[in-house]
Image (tube, grey):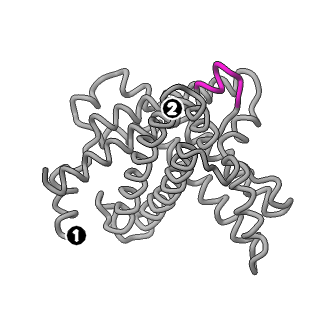
Amino acid sequence: MGSLARFETLTRIGFAARGLTYILIGWLALRVGQAAGASDALGTLADSGGGRLLLILVAAGLFAYGAWRLLEAMLDLEGAGDDAKGVAERAGHGLSGAAHLFLGYTALELALGTPTGGGDGETARAATSWLLTLPAGSVLVRAIAAALMLAGAYQIVEAVQLRFLKQLDPGAAAKDWVRWIGRLGYLARGAVFVLVGLSFWRAGSEGAGAAGGTGEALGSLSGTSQAVVAAGLLLFGLFSLVQAAYRRITDPRVAERLRARL
């Protein structure tokens, strides 16, 4: 197996791991009534039969996905370009990569039975607390908030315009059910990003206690609203499994850029 083939295989495992994470988040909210973040959702696997082995596999997948996102940012694998829009898109990929590497580390800690940190919300508050100690800390926190809200808005636009379909093999992209789970999934994920961004914006003036993660975003909703968003996140997880199978990861243009830059 060549290096590009190994790269593609690892990336597909990463999409599958991301998919399982979002399925767990949605399922916990819908069936158990627990508004959980990603690390909290993965923590439920540690208590199930065979869960620790599955967590190790999920950790490996999340590491692979995070590394792929960082490569996207650094090497511009998808040709976003070097203009302002392209740089912003690549920066978003880089942040996503770093976040998934951290989540992979969390999954590995859970698998080994040595978790040292709290859930997503606690991590967000700890990071915000540290940022607020820096010069112009509140400005930095609000810059992160703005980036999160813009990322959420971008995903909502992607959902409305079905932009995500261009990343799939044409056969899969043509299926109505793929279009709908992708659209509803991206809408829900975009809404969560906006809510998390709003919590960081409040933290810029109210203090670190106002910051939160996915769990807090879901928890801020009530009744039907929470159920609808949770169902959307579960669908996003299913769409990630579709991406694991059908996303164009090393199409000729991406492969050419990868060979040129590695």
Task: Name the quadrant containing residue 200.
Answer: bottom right
Task: Name the quadrant containing residue 77.
Answer: bottom left
Per the image, is 59 magenta?
no
For the point 39% across and 64% down, which residue is it?
73
Q: Is residue 199 left or right of residue 20?
A: right
The answer to whether 204 is drawn above or below residue 178 in the figure is below
Q: Is the magenta region chiefly helix, strand or loop?
A: helix
What's under tag 1, amino acid-wise?
Answer: Leu
From the image, tell me which residue sits under label 1.
262
**Where is residue 212 drawn, in percent x and y?**
72, 49
Pick the front one: 225 or 158: 225
For the point 64% across and 39% down, which residue is it?
40
For the point 45% across and 40% down, which residue is it?
18
For the point 67% across and 36% down, which residue is it?
36
What's under tag 2, amino acid-wise?
Answer: Gly
**What's the magenta region?**
27-34
| Label 1 packing within 10 angstroms: few (<14), some (14-19), many (20+) | few
Pick the front one: 65 or 168: 65
- Numbered tag placed on residue 51 in the rendering: 2
Residue lying furthest right in this view? Answer: 206
**Where is residue 124 drawn, in percent x and y?**
69, 55
